[in-house]
Amino acid sequence: MQYQSSLSRVSMVKGYIFASISILVWTGFILISRAGALASLSLADMMIVRFGTAFCVFFPFIWMQRKTIFQWRMMLLGVIGGLAYSLSVFNGFQSAPATHAALLLPGLMPIMIAILAYFLAGERHSEFAWAGIGVSSLGIIILLFETLLSSASYWIGDISFVFACLFWGIFTVLLRRWKFAPWHATLGVITATTVLFVPYYLTQLSHAFEGVPREMIALQAFYQAIMAIAVQFVCYGKAVHILGATKMGALMAMVPLLASTLAIPLFGEQVTTGLVVALICICLGTIIGNVLPIKRPIL
């Protein structure tokens, strides 16, 4: 019994290590994606840099796992977690500031994942989890209302981030329900998105990478293809399998604290009341949903 308890603790530690790596990579993804948009990388260019590079790098593994990849469930995961999510998120980066991405993407994900996990995967959530989600939701709602009521032109970007969260939530729950290995799911996302998007991109070649420095293209190719896809997807998938979709979704709410803190000095973005309130609510929601339920050992 004690041996099983020890194995369980070790497994949970591994889960939180994978989650921590995923959180750090997501933080970098938000900052580097916004930097690419500011450097005039178009939506189509961002997509091809991310998935075209990844497809070329991982093609030998895709070919070896082709029987696992080319099945309808894997392809559906790829369309949802790759094509639909990435189109939405990169469209958001074209107009919305990185601070909004830092709050909306990981802030909304726990809400989407918890609701979808409840209905699609039969997961049951504690009162602490629902309370944390409620507090985080309050901050997100305040930020969205501030954007809609202001004269800012980036509300379309915010709405795109909302849709991105919905697609990622569906992907997360289906990944856990269908129990695909994280590595196979990663290859499936790369394959499905590349196969579907490349035909469209071929019609845009005359405008490809106009005015974008080569250094920025190289940075985007490395981070988007290697870090944000291979490293992040595998770590995220392993964390989901160990910790559960809802727990992982809640932990992702730590990203706003890191990404928004860095985005303000890096990009000179404005600090608004809604931004501050949303950040506080998301951090409090994370504490309520993840820290308070932990049972302390009796000494």
Image: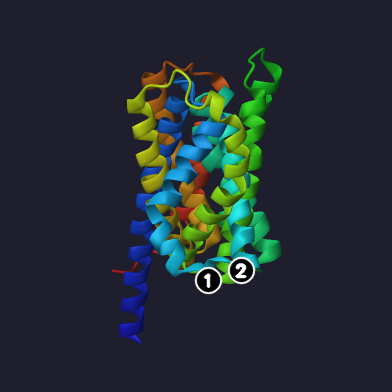
Q: Is residue 91 left or right of residue 11?
A: right
Q: Identify residue for label 2.
A: 71
The image shows residue 232 at horizontal and vertical percentages of 41, 51
CA–CA distance in space, label 2 to label 1:
7 Å
The three-letter code of the residue at mark 1 reads Thr
Q: x and y percent of residue 112 in the render?
A: 64, 50
Q: Nearer the viewer, residue 103 or 70?
A: 70
Q: Residues within 10 Å of mark 1 (few under 14, many from 20)?
A: some
Of the 4 image quadrants, the one containing the N terminus is bottom left
Which dot marks residue 68?
1
The count of marks equals 2
Residue sitting farthest toward the left: 299
Whether residue 135 is visible, yes or no, is: no
Compared with 201, 75 (above or below) is below
Q: Is residue 202 left or right of residue 298?
A: right
Residue 178, by quadrant, is bottom right
Q: Which residue is drawn at the image coordinates 36% and 58% (left, top)?
A: 18
Disc 1 is placed on an element classified as helix
Which residue ends up furthest to the top in the rendered image?
Answer: 151
User: Which quadrant would the C terminus be assigned to in this image?
Assistant: bottom left
Q: Is residue 226 above or below residue 121?
A: above
Residue type, mark 2 in image: Gln
Q: Is residue 172 left or right of residue 256?
A: right
Please name whichever residue, 45 or 181, is drawn nearer the observer in this view of the structure. Answer: 45
Q: Position of residue 166 (x, y in %)?
A: 65, 47
Which is nearer the eye, 284 or 191?
Answer: 191
Classify residue 39 by image quadrant: top left
- Asked whether the residues under the numbered discs 2 and 1 touch, taking CB atoms below 8 Å apart as contact, a structural biologist would say yes
Residue at 39%, 35% (x, y): give it.
Answer: 220
